[in-house]
Amino acid sequence: MEIRDCTAEDIDRLEEWQPTGRDRAHGTRFARHAAGTSSFLVAWSADSPLGSCEVLWNGPKEPAVQAAFDCPEINGLQVWPPSRQGRGIGTALVAEAEDRARRRGVVLIGLGVADDNPRAAALYLRLGYAVTDCRYVDRWHYLDDAGVRHDQADPCVWLVKPL
């Protein structure tokens, strides 16, 4: 497995791997990466993507969390398809994100986890993240193939790790 920065040439392959429909979320993440406000990391096996995550260097995307914590956020960690979860891909992506943060002189990094995702929460706790008292609702949307918008709201808790 190789973890590297996403490139413009990777976007179509990522959409084949995990379609994001009309939202083209992979392209949005890459645009932030290209602008220097994030690092969009992709784990590969040969020419097949295994997982990805983004490090938001300007801090947490949720305003309430940003007001409470001045640190980068690891966001959008995913391993796809779910049958590949539990094989160390997510752990490797988090480790790479943390290493990059350390090289930038970052001393604290954070991430959010949805209440209904105990498997991810267990991973983060195992990796040394600590639960804070900062709770928020992650609001996001996606467009289906017909262009219909679906709004989502996930109750979350913020976790942090000193680097």
Image (cartoon, rainbow, N blue to C red):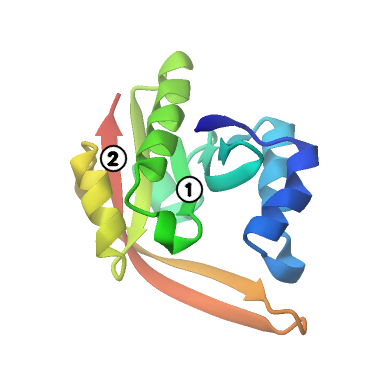
Left or right of 107 on screen, residue 52: right
How many residues crowd mark 1 within 10 Å: few (<14), some (14–19), many (20+)? many
The image shows residue 59 at horizontal and vertical percentages of 48, 39
**Earlier-in-chain disc, 1 versus 2:** 1
Residue position marked by numbered label 2 in the rendering: 160
How far apart marks 1 and 2 lie (CA) works out to 13 Å
Amino acid type, callout 1: Asn
Q: Measured along the vertical axis of the image, is residue 128 above or below residue 145?
A: above
Instruction: Single out the residue that lies furthest toward the front.
Output: 46
Q: Residue at x 57, y 79 (%)?
A: 151
Q: Type of residue at label 2?
A: Val
Image coords of residue 69 (percent x, y): 36, 40
* Residue 133 seen in this snapshot: no
Residue to which mark 1 is pinned:
75
The secondary structure type at the circle numbered 2 is strand
Q: Quadrant of residue 102?
A: top left
**Left/right of residue 89 with respect to residue 7 in the rendered view:** left
Residue 111 disc label:
none
Q: Please indicate, yes or no, whether residue 98 appears anywhere in the rendered image.
A: yes
What quarter of the picture does the C terminus occupy? top left
* Element on which disc 1 rests: strand
Q: Which one is nearer the viewer's eye here, 18 or 126?
A: 18
Closer-to-camera residue (67/158): 158
Residue depicted at x 63% and y 72%: 142
- In this rendered view, identify the residue nearer to me: 97 or 139: 97
Report x, y in % for residue 87.
35, 46
Characterize the local packing of mark 2: few (<14), some (14-19) or many (20 or more) Cα atoms within 10 angstroms: many
Q: In this view, does 131 lie to the left or right of 110?
A: left
